[in-house]
C-alpha cells in the first residue's frame, strides 16, 4: 500500500508541474492593436530605429513590466543611445536584455501595464552601426549601398489579434528621383509597393507601407538601396568579403556537413522557385500601375478643376475605361461619330469643336490611323501625355485628399441619377454626369441596375454612338430617326407656333448594355490585351529602374545574392532579431 501511495504522490506532483509550466510561459498575454516602425539611414552610415507600440494587456495576462526589443543582426550599438517612454513619461531604466540575444530591455516599473489596461510605449535608439552593405554591381556606373530591416517580433503565445502596422524606411538626403530603390517586402500582408513615398523634412526619400492585417508574431523584411556617395563615412558600408566573414557554426561530422549542404541548397532552390512565381505575379500587377510613386514633397489641399478623365488617371482606373471616357466625351461634344463598332471606326466632324482638350485632339488623331499597331502605339502616347499632365497639375497638392474629393463628386453624381423621379430626368442627369459616374468601380453593374427596366429617352448625342440611329435635319435641328428597335422621334406643334422634338426611346436594358458594352468594345477593338497595353505605358511613366543583378532590387523586382551562412543571409542585411514576449 505504501508503494502505491508514493507512486500516487509522485504522479500528482508531476501533473502539477506539467500544469504549472504552460501557465508560467503564457503569463504575458496582450494585444498590439497598433505599431509604428521608423528605420532611418543617417548620413554617417549608422541607423536610427524608432518604435511606437500600443499594448492592450489582456485581463488574463500578468502585469507588463518589461518590453524587450531586438536590434539589427550583427549590428553594433550602445544602450546609452536608447530612450523610451510610457504614455509620454520618460523611462529611466533601459538595459541590455537578459531575455533575448542582441536586444534592449525596457523596464516599465513602477508603471507596469495592468491586466485590462492599455499603454503606449515609445522607443528610439541612434548610432546603430554595421547595417549597410556594398551592392555587388553598380547602377549607372555608381556604387550602391543596401540594407534589409526586419521589425521586432514578439514571442509566440504572448500576443493575440492583428496589428495595424506602419513601417517607414528613411533614406539619407541628397537623392535624385531615379536613384533610390526599395525591396519588395517579404511576407508582408499589405501591398508590395509603398503606400506612400516622398521627401522628408531633411530632403531624404522615404518609403512607407501600412497594413491592418499585420501581426507582431510574423517576420517581415523590408529593404532598400541608394548611391554610396551619400554616406560620409565610407567605412560604414561593409563589403561582401566582410559580410562573408560572419561566423558560421560548423559540425565535425562529414555526414552532417553533407546534410546541411543539401538542405541549404534545397531550401535555396525552393526559395528561388517561390520568388520566381511571386515575381511573375508581381510583374503582372505592376504593369497596371501606370502612375509613378510620388517622389516629390506632397503638398496639402485639394486640386480642384480636374476633368473626370484626369481624375480617372489620378485614381489609376483601368485604361480601357479611361479611353472609353474620352470616346464618349468627344462624341458628346460633336467632334466625331461612330461609323462601325467592330472594328471601331470614327468619322470626324468638320469643323472640329473649339472646346476639345489636348488629350481629346490626340485621341481623335490616333483613331484615324489605319494600322492597329500604329493606333495602339498612338493611344499609349495619349495616356503617357495624360499621366504627365496630371503629375504637373498635382504638384503642391495632396493626391490622397484630391482622390477623396473626386470620389465624393462621383458619389453625388450617382445620387442625382438614382434619385430622379422620371426616366427623362434620370437619363438627363446620367448624361450630365456620365464621366463622373464612370469613376465608380461598380459602374457596369450600377448602370444596368439603374436603367434595366422600362423605356428611356436616349441622350441627344446618342446617334453618334449607335450607328443604327441616323441623323437627319428637321427645321435646322439635328435629330435622331429610327433604326433597328429605336422608336422614331415625334414632332408636334408647341404653344406659340414653336416645334417640339421628342427624342427616341429605347428599352432601358438595351441602353445600359450599350453604354457598358462601350468599354468592352473599345478594349477588344483598340486596346487589346489590357495588361500589355498598360505595361507599355508603365514602362515610360513608372519604369522599373534598370538593374543587372547584385544585392539590390529595383521597384517591384526580386532577387539578391544569398548565402546559407546566416539566418538573414542576403548581402545588405540588417535584420532585427525576435524580441519581446515577456
Image: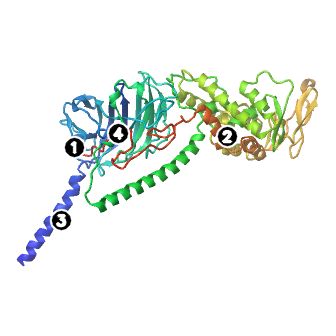
Q: Which mark is residue 241?
A: 4
Which residue in the structure is indicated by mark 2? 533
Q: Earlier in the sequence, mark 2 or mark 3?
A: 3
Of the two numbered discs 1 and 3 on the same chain, state the one appearing first in sequence.
3
Q: Is residue 125 visible?
A: no
To which quarter of the image does residue 374 belong?
top right
Question: Whole-Å distance between the Cαs marked 2 and 1?
Answer: 58 Å
Residue located beneath label 3 in the image: 15
Q: Nearer the viewer, residue 427 or 438?
A: 438
Mark in the foreground, 2 or 3: 2
Pick the front one: 201 or 493? 201
Q: CA distance from mark 3 to mark 4?
A: 53 Å
Residue occupied by mark 1: 63
Q: Position of residue 24 (x, y in %)?
A: 20, 53
Q: Residue 3: horizontal and vertical position, in percent?
A: 7, 76
Image quadrant where residue 216 sits = top left
Q: Secondary structure at mark 2?
A: helix
Q: Residues within 10 Å of mark 2 (few under 14, many from 20)?
A: many
Quadrant position of the N terminus in the picture: bottom left
Mark 4 or 2: in front is 4
Of pointers 2 and 1, the one earlier in the residue sequence: 1
Q: Residue at x 56, y 27 (%)?
A: 402
Q: Is residue 519 above or below residue 303?
A: below
Q: Within 10 angstroms of label 4, few (less than 14), some, or many (20 or more) residues?
A: few
Q: Secondary structure at mark 3?
A: helix
Question: CA separation, marks 1 and 4?
Answer: 46 Å
Helix, strand or loop under label 1: loop
For the residues labelled 1 and 3, the Cα–Cα distance comes to 26 Å
Residues at marks 2 and 3, CA–CA distance in whole angstroms: 68 Å
| For marks 4 and 2 on the same chain, the one whose residue lies earlier in the sequence | 4
Answer whether labels 1 and 3 touch (C-beta < 8 Å). no
Amino acid at each position: 500500500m505504501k508503494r502505491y501511495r508514493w507512486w500516487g504522490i509522485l504522479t500528482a506532483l508531476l501533473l502539477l508541474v506539467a500544469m504549472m509550466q504552460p501557465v508560467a510561459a503564457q503569463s504575458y498575454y496582450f494585444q498590439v492593436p497598433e505599431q509604428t516602425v521608423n528605420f532611418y539611414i543617417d548620413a554617417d552610415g549608422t541607423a536610427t530605429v524608432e518604435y511606437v507600440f500600443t499594448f492592450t494587456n489582456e485581463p488574463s495576462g500578468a502585469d507588463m513590466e518589461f518590453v524587450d526589443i531586438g536590434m539589427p543582426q550583427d549590428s553594433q550599438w550602445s544602450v546609452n543611445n536608447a530612450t523610451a517612454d510610457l504614455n509620454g513619461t520618460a523611462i529611466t531604466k533601459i538595459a541590455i536584455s537578459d531575455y533575448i540575444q542582441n536586444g534592449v530591455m525596457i523596464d516599465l516599473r513602477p508603471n507596469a501595464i495592468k491586466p485590462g489596461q492599455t499603454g503606449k510605449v515609445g522607443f528610439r535608439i541612434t548610432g546603430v552601426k554595421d547595417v549597410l552593405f556594398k551592392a555587388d554591381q553598380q547602377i549607372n556606373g555608381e556604387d550602391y549601398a543596401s540594407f534589409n530591416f526586419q521589425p521586432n517580433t514578439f514571442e509566440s503565445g504572448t500576443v493575440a489579434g492583428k496589428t495595424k502596422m506602419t513601417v517607414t524606411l528613411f533614406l539619407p538626403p541628397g537623392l535624385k528621383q531615379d536613384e533610390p530603390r526599395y525591396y519588395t517586402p517579404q511576407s508582408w500582408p499589405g501591398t508590395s509597393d509603398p503606400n506612400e513615398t516622398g521627401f522628408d523634412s531633411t530632403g531624404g526619400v522615404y518609403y512607407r507601407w501600412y497594413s491592418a492585417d499585420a501581426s507582431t508574431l510574423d517576420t517581415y523584411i523590408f529593404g532598400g538601396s541608394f548611391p554610396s556617395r551619400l554616406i560620409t563615412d565610407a567605412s560604414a558600408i561593409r563589403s561582401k568579403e566582410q559580410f562573408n566573414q560572419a561566423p558560421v557554426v560548423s559540425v565535425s561530422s562529414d555526414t552532417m556537413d553533407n546534410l546541411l549542404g543539401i538542405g541549404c541548397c534545397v531550401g535555396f532552390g525552393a526559395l528561388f522557385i517561390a520568388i520566381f512565381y511571386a515575381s511573375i505575379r508581381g510583374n503582372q500587377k505592376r504593369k497596371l500601375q501606370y502612375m509613378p510613386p510620388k517622389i516629390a514633397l506632397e503638398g496639402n489641399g485639394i486640386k480642384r478643376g480636374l476633368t473626370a478623365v484626369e481624375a480617372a488617371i489620378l485614381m489609376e482606373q483601368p485604361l480601357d475605361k479611361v479611353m472609353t471616357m474620352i470616346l464618349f466625351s468627344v462624341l458628346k461634344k460633336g467632334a466625331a461619330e461612330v461609323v462601325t463598332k467592330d472594328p471601331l471606326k470614327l468619322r470626324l466632324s468638320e469643323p472640329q469643336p473649339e472646346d476639345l482638350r489636348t488629350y481629346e485632339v490626340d485621341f481623335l488623331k490616333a483613331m484615324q490611323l489605319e494600322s492597329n499597331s500604329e493606333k495602339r502605339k498612338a493611344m499609349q502616347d495619349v495616356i503617357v501625355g495624360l499621366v504627365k499632365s496630371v503629375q504637373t497639375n498635382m504638384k503642391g497638392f495632396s493626391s490622397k485628399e484630391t482622390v477623396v474629393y473626386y470620389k465624393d463628386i462621383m458619389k453625388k453624381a450617382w445620387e442625382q441619377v438614382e434619385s430622379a423621379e422620371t426616366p427623362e430626368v434620370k437619363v438627363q442627369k446620367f448624361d450630365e454626369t456620365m464621366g463622373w459616374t464612370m469613376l465608380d468601380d461598380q459602374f457596369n453593374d450600377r448602370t444596368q441596375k439603374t436603367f434595366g427596366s422600362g423605356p428611356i429617352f436616349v441622350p441627344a448625342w446618342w446617334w453618334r454612338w449607335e450607328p443604327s440611329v441616323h441623323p437627319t435635319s428637321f427645321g435646322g435641328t439635328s435629330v435622331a430617326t429610327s433604326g433597328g428597335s429605336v422608336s422614331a422621334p415625334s414632332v408636334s406643334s408647341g404653344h406659340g407656333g414653336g416645334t417640339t422634338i421628342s427624342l427616341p426611346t429605347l428599352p432601358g436594358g438595351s441602353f445600359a448594355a450599350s453604354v457598358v458594352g462601350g468599354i468592352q468594345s473599345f478594349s477588344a477593338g483598340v486596346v487589346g490585351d489590357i495588361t500589355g497595353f498598360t505595361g507599355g505605358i508603365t514602362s515610360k511613366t513608372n519604369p522599373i529602374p534598370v538593374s543587372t543583378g547584385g544585392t539590390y532590387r529595383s521597384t517591384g523586382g526580386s532577387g539578391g545574392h544569398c548565402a546559407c551562412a546566416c539566418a538573414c543571409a542576403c548581402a545588405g542585411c540588417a535584420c532585427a532579431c525576435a524580441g519581446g514576449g515577456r
